């Protein structure tokens, strides 16, 4: 038996990092969905008033998606700035990729902006199905 600590290979490090990255992405999507679903349910009265005044289903869906996209873009911009600051730390874990590879940064930014849009689609559709009469009655 060796007393020397075990070291993981580069391939193991990459797999482990990929698994944790996917897990973080799933947890973020679930959290975004929960917050948006709660936010939309809290605004049911407002959405009912808008629909009673003539706002269509598409207008309600666009409003909810626009708000979530604004939050997603601000989060992606802040995350990109943080990632650029931390590239030196992760540089030794990268293989055949520069730490500031533009293709990687753009693809990750698009992925991370797309996750909130997908996570907000269900609350947006649920908000569009609010019955104006019920929303106005219950306050």
Image (spheres, helix red, strand yellow):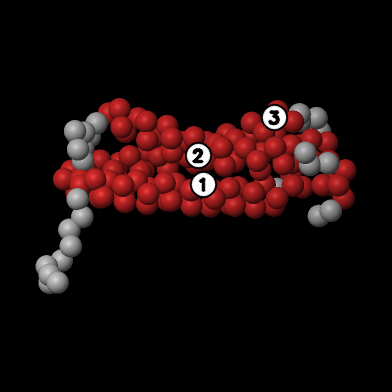
- Cα gap from disc 1 to disc 3, whole angstroms: 24 Å
Tell me residue 19's x, y (percent): 37, 49
The residue to which callout 3 is attached is 59
In this rendering, the count of numbered labels is 3
Residue 91 lies in quadrant: top left
| Sequence-first tag of 1 and 2 | 1
Instruction: Name the residue that disc number 1 marks.
Output: 29
> In the structure shown, which secondary structural element does the residue marked by tag 3 occupy?
helix
The disc label shown at residue 115, or none: 2
Asked if residue 76 can be seen in this view, the reply is yes
* Among numbered discs 2 and 3, the one appearing first in the sequence: 3
Q: Residues within 10 Å of mark 1 (few under 14, many from 20)?
A: many
Q: Position of residue 14 (x, y in %)?
A: 27, 46
One can see residue 67 in this view: no
Name the residue nearer the viewer: 97 or 71.
Answer: 97
State the residue at coordinates (79%, 42%).
Answer: 130
Labels 1 and 3: the sequence-earlier one: 1
The kind of secondary structure element at disc 2 is helix
Q: Dots 1 and 2: beta carbons under 8 Å?
A: yes
In x, y percent, where is residue 90? 21, 46
């Amino acid at each position: 038996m060796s007393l020397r600590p075990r070291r993981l290979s580069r391939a193991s490090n990459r797999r482990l990092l990929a698994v944790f990255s996917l897990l973080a992405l799933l947890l973020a999507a679930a959290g975004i969905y929960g917050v948006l679903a709660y936010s939309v349910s809290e605004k049911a009265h407002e959405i009912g008033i808008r629909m009673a005044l003539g706002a269509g289903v598409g207008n309600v869906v666009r409003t909810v998606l626009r708000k979530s996209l604004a939050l997603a873009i601000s989060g992606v911009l802040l995350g990109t700035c943080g990632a650029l600051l931390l590239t030196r730390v992760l540089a030794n874990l990268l293989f055949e990729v520069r730490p500031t590879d533009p293709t990687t940064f753009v693809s990750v930014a698009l992925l991370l902006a797309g996750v909130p849009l997908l996570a907000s689609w269900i609350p947006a559709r649920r908000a569009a199905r609010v019955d104006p009469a019920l929303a106005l009655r219950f306050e």
